[in-house]
């Protein structure tokens, strides 16, 4: 007979909305987001932190949600790709990725956008070296990264104009 695991309460602010959920202690943050909160923009790619498709911001810092336990987000703020848009309007990073053709299949895109968001929240004029460092934890298997760099540079220039 399977052992019953006692669930724990996790209170987390996701995309500006306070959430309280009861989860097994072994539940991963990506599972909480996708399965409990139906926020499927955060992707599961490798389960080893290699690909970065599951990247979210936890208290403003990019983390791999496939190896972060849900309980580690208790009392924290989580930003997912769904939280970038406001009132039906795409965030300037989301718009830049489309305008600069910084995506192909789109699987890695949410993680790349959140890594770019973290970078641009620190400053609005990153060098290519800064961009490379910021997205080093994100793997894209479809592109040569050039349009991803262009998208982040476009987002940076758009941010300057805001």
Image (cartoon, rainbow, N blue to C red):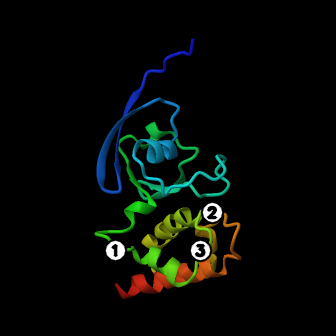
Between discs 2 and 3, the one toward the N terminus: 3
Between discs 2 and 1, the one toward the N terminus: 1
Residue 2, horizontal then vertical, whole percent: 56, 16
Between discs 3 and 1, the one toward the N terminus: 1
The answer to whether residue 60 is seen in the rendering is: yes
Residue 11, horizontal then vertical, whole percent: 33, 40
Tag 2's secondary structure? loop
Q: Is residue 130 above or below residue 2?
A: below
Tag 3's secondary structure? loop
User: Could you say which disc has been placed on residue 138 in the image?
Assistant: 2
Residue 70, horizontal then vertical, whole percent: 46, 40
Q: Is residue 137 above or below residue 34?
A: below
The residue to which callout 1 is attached is: 89
Q: Residue at x 50, y 43 (%)?
A: 31
Horizontal arrangement in the rendering, residue 87 relative to residue 97 (left or right): left
Q: Residue at x 59, y 62 (%)?
A: 107
Estimate how packed mark 3 is, as few (under 14), some (14 to 19) or many (20 or more) residues with alpha carbons within 10 Å: many
Horizontal arrangement in the rendering, residue 72 relative to residue 138 (left or right): left
The residue to which callout 3 is attached is: 103
Residue 61, horizontal then vertical, whole percent: 47, 57
Which quadrant does the N terminus fall into? top right
């Amino acid at each position: 007979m399977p052992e019953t695991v006692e669930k724990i309460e996790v209170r987390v602010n996701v995309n500006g909305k306070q959430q309280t959920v009861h989860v097994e202690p072994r539940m991963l943050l990506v599972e909480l987001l996708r399965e409990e909160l139906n926020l499927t923009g955060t992707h599961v790619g490798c389960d080893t932190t290699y690909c970065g498709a599951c990247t979210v911001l936890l208290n403003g810092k990019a983390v791999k949600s496939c190896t972060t336990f849900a309980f580690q987000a208790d009392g924290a703020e989580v930003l997912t790709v769904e939280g970038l848009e406001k009132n039906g309007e795409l965030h300037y990073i989301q718009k830049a990725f489309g305008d600069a053709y910084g995506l192909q299949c789109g699987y890695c895109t949410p993680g790349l956008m959140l890594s770019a968001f973290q970078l641009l929240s620190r400053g609005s004029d990153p060098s290519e070296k800064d961009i490379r460092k910021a997205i080093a934890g994100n793997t894209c298997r479809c592109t040569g990264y050039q349009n991803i760099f262009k998208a982040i540079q476009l987002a940076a220039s758009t941010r300057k104009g805001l």
